[in-house]
Image: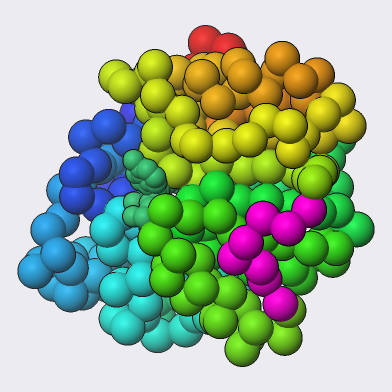
Amino acid sequence: MFELNGETKQLGIIGYPVEHSFSPQMHNYISEKMGNNYVYSAFCVREENLKEAVEGIRAMGFAGVNVTAPHKVEVMKYLDVLSEKAKLFQSVNTIVNKNGTLYGYTTDADGFYASLKRVGCDVKGKDILFVGAGGATRPVVSLFAMEGAKSITINNRTREKAEKIAENVKNSLDYSVDCDIKLSHYDVVINTTPIGMYPKTDAMPAFDMSLVDSTSYVADMIYNPEETLFLKEAKKTGAKTLNGLGMLIYQGIIAYELFTGTKLPEGIYDEISKNVFNK
Ligand code: NAP
């Protein structure tokens, strides 16, 4: 462990619950590896204490914090400056404190897209299908619209939630999102529901696997288990698959770069994957 001293800068994550988070291990690993004098902890913050917790970032001189569920939207109103993407995606998962001014950023969607690109998948010109329409869906839908996806469809149990995202993307980016499956083939399919996540690993979202084939990429935002039933079934069609670990690692790398104002080396992804996640 690196030495903590009077000059150590504080980082952390706020959420409720937050005990399951891997962010402390990931960020502390990066700081140790890079020889940066930062320490990162997890803070369990209930909804009724969010405002005070954000004020605490300023009062205590924290360098920055990550924000996780359920605060990613609510936290926005307590910040001084929002990035363009935070405004467009209506989500903040990274707060940076620059001399008492709190800046809000969102790195989840960029993290997810970086993980797709890592396996050779570019969304430009592609037909994309999202299964689920929760908090993690909207930023990625917006980013893919910005990145030139040919079509985007959201299939969700509660249709109104898919329609809400579609309406928002239409208003903010003038891009039309479909809420019905109309095509017979999709290039990229993403499970953004928690169905199949540990411990209920024998479940998978209702999905017609004939919509994908060996030319498709099928992704799951879940990373525990490493291969969900959804990904196992997709693999049988010949589709290339990936889980949510890449998203988790890349959103953290981008957040760390924002916290410290430095660029991390290319190889840091593999080092985190190996040394923090044993993958
Ligand atoms: P959320 O806001 O709670 O949304 C969950 C979505 O899943 C909703 O659209 C919900 O449908 C749907 N859903 C849940 N249970 C369902 C069921 N039994 N049948 C059909 N639909 C169901 O969750 P979130 O924050 O978007 O997170 C979604 C997933 O992404 C989670 O597994 C989370 O762990 C993962 N995630 C991963 C990362 C990463 O770094 N890898 C980052 C963020 C999130 P309704 O609208 O009908 O309720």
Which quarter of the picture shows residue 238?
top right
Residue at coordinates 15% horizontally, 56% vertically from top-left? 45
Which one is in front, 79 or 239? 239
Residue at coordinates 63% horizontally, 35% vertically from top-left? 208
Which one is in front, 234 or 219? 234
- Locate residue 18 relative to residue 166 in the image: left or right: left
How many numbered tags mark residues here? 0
Q: Is residue 141 above or below residue 186?
A: below
Q: Position of residue 221 (x, y in %)?
A: 53, 38
Residue at coordinates 65% horizontally, 83% vertically from top-left? 170
Q: Which of the image's four quarters has the C terminus?
A: top right
**Magenta stretch contains residue 24:** no
Residue at coordinates 91% horizontally, 58% vertically from top-left? 125
Which one is in front, 59 or 277? 277
Per the rendered image, the range of residues in magenta is 176-183
Q: Is residue 18 above or below residue 143?
A: above
Q: Position of residue 157 (x, y in %)?
A: 42, 53
Q: Position of residue 184 (x, y in %)?
A: 80, 46
Q: Is residue 226 above or below residue 243?
A: above
Q: Which of the image's four quarters has the N terminus?
A: top left
Q: Main secondary structure of the magenta part?
A: loop
Give the colour scheme shown: rainbow
**Magenta stretch contains residue 177:** yes
Whether residue 34 is visible here, answered yes or no, is: no
- Locate residue 111 relative to residue 127 in the image: left or right: left
Whether residue 192 is visible here, answered yes or no, is: yes
Which one is in front, 141 or 104? 141
**Residue positioned most to the left:** 48
